Structures are given as structure tokens and as C-alpha cells.
Image (tube, rainbow, N blue to C red):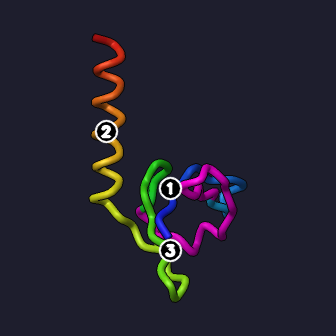
């Protein structure tokens, strides 16, 4: 399941957002240490959470394009 790392709370919780906009918390230790808010993560069938940098890049590029078009 693809999710977005929304934010950290209380230095030990990570708030993740599903594609439908709902959020849920996980222990910050469950996600990769290198993960930053805005990064895409994949929750695999075994529960392991991994970074998906190519999806993060695609989404950031799409947002940049939309912002550029908005300000033209």
C-alpha cells in the first residue's frame, strides 16, 4: 500500500496518509530513518515500510508543474 509520510508528532510517531486522504499513526522507528515528510512509502505485505524515491520524485515534479502553470 502506497502512503505519504505526512508529519512527525511527539518525536516518536509518524503520521501517514493513504490515497483516500485518511491518516493513521505508526511508531517513527517503523519507517526508514532517512524518510522525510512528503516522502512516499510502501507498506509491504509483511508490514515492512520502505521508501519509494521514484514515486516521491514524480509527485514533486507534478506539483511543481501545477504550481508553475498556476503562476503563469
Report the side of 59 relative to 47 (left or right): left
Q: Earlier in the sequence, mark 2 or mark 3?
A: 3
Task: List the single residue furthest toward the right.
Answer: 10
In front of the other: 33 or 62: 62
34 above or below 68? below
Q: Position of residue 10 (x, y in %)?
A: 72, 55
- Please tell me which residue is depicted at 68% across the width and 61% down the height of the picture: 24
Report the side of 64 relative to 40 (left or right): left
Q: Earlier in the sequence, mark 3 or mark 1?
A: 1
In front of the other: 42 or 31: 42
Highlighted range, magenta: 15-34
The residue that mark 2 highlights is 62
Task: List the single residue furthest toward the top.
Answer: 72
Q: What crowding class fits label 2: few (fewer than 14 Cα within 10 Å), some (14-19), or many (20 or more)?
A: few
48 above or below 6? below
Q: Does the magenta stretch include residue 45?
A: no
Q: Where is residue 67 in the image (x, y as percent from the top left)?
A: 35, 24
Q: What crowding class fits label 1: few (fewer than 14 Cα within 10 Å), some (14-19), or many (20 or more)?
A: many
Instruction: Tell me the SS state at disc 2.
Output: helix
Q: What crowding class fits label 3: few (fewer than 14 Cα within 10 Å), some (14-19), or many (20 or more)?
A: some
The residue that mark 3 highlights is 43
51 above or below 72? below
- Please tell me which residue is depicted at 62% across the width and 53% down the height of the picture: 8
Instruction: Tell me the SS state at disc 3.
Output: strand
Q: Nearer the viewer, mark 1 or mark 2?
A: 2
Amino acid at each position: 500500500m502506497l502512503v505519504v509520510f505526512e508529519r512527525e508528532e511527539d518525536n516518536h510517531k509518524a503520521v501517514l496518509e493513504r490515497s483516500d486522504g485518511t491518516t493513521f499513526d505508526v511508531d517513527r522507528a517503523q519507517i526508514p530513518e532517512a524518510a522525510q515528510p512528503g516522502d512516499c512509502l510502501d507498506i509491504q505485505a509483511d508490514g515492512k515500510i520502505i521508501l519509494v524515491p521514484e514515486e516521491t520524485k514524480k509527485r514533486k515534479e507534478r506539483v511543481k508543474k501545477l504550481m508553475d502553470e498556476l503562476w503563469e
